[in-house]
Image: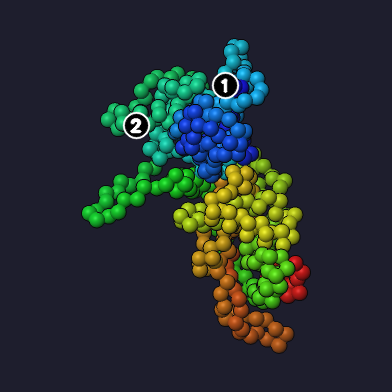
Amino acid sequence: MAQKEILLPKMGESVAEATIIKWLKNEGDPVKADEPIVEIATDKVDSEVPAPHDGILLKRSVNEGDVVKVGQPIAIIGTEAGSSQVAAAPAPATSSSNGATKAAPVMATSSAPVAVLGKNGPTGKFYSPLVRNIAHSEGVSMAELEALAGSGEGGRVTKRDLLAYLPNRSTSPGPVHSTPVPTSAAQPTASSPRPEARPEPQAPKVTPSQGDELIEMDRMRKLIADHMVMSKHVSPHVTSFVEADVTNLWLWREKVKNAFEKREGEKITFTPIFLMAVAQAIKEMPMINVQVDGNTIIKKKDINIGMAAALPSGNLIVPVIRNADRLNLVGLAKAVNDLANRARQGKLSPDEISGGTYTVTNVGTFGNVLGTPIINQPQVAIMATGAIRKKPAVIETPTGDVIAIRHMMFLSHSYDHRVVDGALGGKFVRRVADILENWPLDAEY
């Protein structure tokens, strides 16, 4: 019987590793091609790994709870045909200055939730997203992580190492294993004063009262919480507001919605129209479509707009419409409806929730008139569209001002003040409002 390794597949351009959640097959079980054999979870989405072909699951190479890199073997399947040799899957390697070879860490540039701690410590140790998130939530400093003797490959600190350390830390905090730190990182120079240590902010301790219900956060809620805290820590948020008169847009949609659905088989909501206006404004003001890496601004070539969607569980997910500026209104409507439906069903792939360069959240669907959204890192801006309401408004006419009932809405634009100043942030949201206000009543679709 030939043996073939199953490797953890690539799950998105910025996904470097995944956590093994649950094995669906036991060793010795028969499997069929495309049949799921294991459930995995990344920082972006939960999914399943299917068997590449028919056979017998001979060996599960990793355990539930393990963090596995993309391309790493996770199982061995026996098949009837082919060579009996197991295909080798060596990890990428780099050579150090002394000629020794060590495993090269896979670096992710994900917009998914990560802890404030960096992927690598001062000594170059690699820390997985799972380890970083646990360390962040438990208040474990980078110095403590660096001092841990890891049991993983190349001394890497694993989830088990960190969880085993936490009980000891509560009674005897401090390093449990001494790891030398480079002199340049550990000691200030004589010419520079030693910086004062700033304590990490800690959440207040909450004691439940009798009768209170304790609800454990699920995995997605923990990731969202970490991502939101990290975003507020990284980016100084500023929010600009504009009120837009979208009466023409409202009347146009009322006029075409039945014919649109009959012709295209899709409902036309306001969301694809908002996305079209945002995409047009980004093309005119491309410095909104940037990311920050240290002191470098990365101006993104593609316009990939994320649309925040609420799940039945109450959690939030942000599927991405790639190259939104290249789609017409019909294409955007089909993309919005498809992604929203599959998001609610939990059928999105990791690629479909990664790579966004700007995000829109329609808080009007909940009856909210405006909001102050938090930036979806590593993006630098996000727009919230409020509910459209009938309001009295002043209309200028050639014969004087009059008060009329109009369809009005608020647009809220949060942006990263490190790289987006008030002028650009304010002009951008004003431009989106202008596009919506000047929507032609005879617009084609």
Quarter-of-image position of residue 99? top right
Q: Residues within 10 Å of mark 2 (few under 14, many from 20)?
A: some
Q: Is residue 31 visible?
A: yes
Q: Is residue 303 above or below residue 159?
A: below
Q: Is residue 39 above or below residue 76?
A: below
Label 1 residue SS: strand
Looking at the rendered structure, which numbered label has been put on residue 166? 2
Q: Quadrant of the C terminus?
A: bottom right
User: Which residue is rendered at x = 69% and y = 45% of the image?
Assistant: 300
Which percent across, then down, holds residue 206?
A: 30, 49
Where does the image place residue 221, in percent across and percent down from the top left?
45, 48
Tell me which numbered mark, 2 or 1, is placed earlier along the sequence. Answer: 1
Is residue 372 left or right of 406 when viewed as pictured? left
**Secondary structure under the numbered disc 2 in the rendered image:** helix
Q: Nearer the viewer, residue 382 or 28?
A: 28
Residue drawn at the location 33% of the way across and 47% of the way down: 204
Task: Indicate how the structure is coloured in the image.
Answer: rainbow
- The three-letter code of the residue at mark 1 reads Ala
Give whichever of 78, 438 is nearer the camera: 78
Residue furthest toward the left? 210
Residue 186 left/right relative to 420:
left
